[in-house]
Amino acid sequence: MTGAPGDTADQLLVANVRGRWSEVLRGDATDEEVVLGDWNLVDRDIDPARIAVLIGVRQRIIVRAWPVRNPQPVTGYDRPRIRFEPAGERLRHLEGKPSPYAWRRGEMYPVVALPLAQLDIDPAPLTPVDLGPAGEARIGGYALRVDEHGATVTVPAGRQLSVVTVVTLMDEAATIEPVRMDDFLRAHAATGQPATAAGSE
């Protein structure tokens, strides 16, 4: 059985690797060996040709993620099993995020297929973009526009936006250090002067 990501690859395979992840930590197995196979998809009625992304989950946290292709049968098991190949670099921006699926106590099957759209984080990696003095960029469904008046961010429906303000203060040696906003406000409150900083409103 062979396949490659394409129009039919519209699912995410979530694999619970809790039982074998200790092998990776000990160096007895590679992360690819543990995450990419060998999985019994028959009992879950999962079509391997529809799998576009495979993530390994341990304790409800994504530990590895790959785009995958070319599912191959693996011999030597009582039930049919499948192993995938990476279709590209690891999706590191997904790793460390909460799993889109939580196994319930007593649930037997270590794999489940979900619609790719159910992944809260866009599977495409987020690449830093230099907009220069003005321009527009679209990253992972978000749109950022910068002009002479400031910046505007458009957020896809159902997604979140977190804004972190970094204030820099220059000391007598002319070195620049990041400071927390609450420390910045306390410092100015002690002087009795208004606290203003570019980009903080």
Image (cartoon, rainbow, N blue to C red):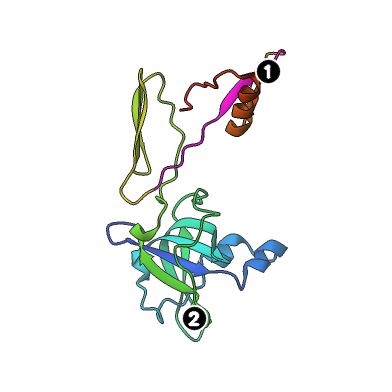
Residue 53: image quadrant is: bottom left
Above or below — where is 122 with respect to 43? above
- The residue under label 1 is which amino acid type? Thr
| 71 inside magenta stretch | no
Q: Nearer the viewer, residue 1 or 91?
A: 91
Instruction: Between label 1 and label 2, give the one nearer the viewer.
Output: 1
Residue sitting at x 62%, y 61%: 30
- State the extent of the magenta-drawn residues as a range: 160-172
Across and down, in percent, residue 18 comes to 59, 70
Residue sitting at x 69%, y 62%: 25
Residue sitting at x 48%, y 79%: 109
Label located before the other in sequence (1 or 2) = 2
According to the picture, the residue beneath numbered tag 1 turns out to be 175
- Disc 1 to disc 2, how far (Cα)? 56 Å
| 168 inside magenta stretch | yes
Across and down, in percent, residue 190 comes to 66, 23
Q: What secondary structure is the stretch in magenta mostly built from?
A: loop
Tell me the tag on residue 140: none
Residue at disc 1, secondary structure: loop
Across and down, in percent, residue 9 comes to 33, 61
| Picture mark count | 2
Residue at the farthest bottom position: 78
Residue 153: image quadrant is: top left
Do residues under tags 1 and 2 come within 8 Å of each other at their CB atoms?
no
- The residue under label 2 is which amino acid type? Glu
> Badge 1, how many Cα within 10 Å: few under 14, some, many 20+?
few
The answer to whether residue 148 is visible is: yes
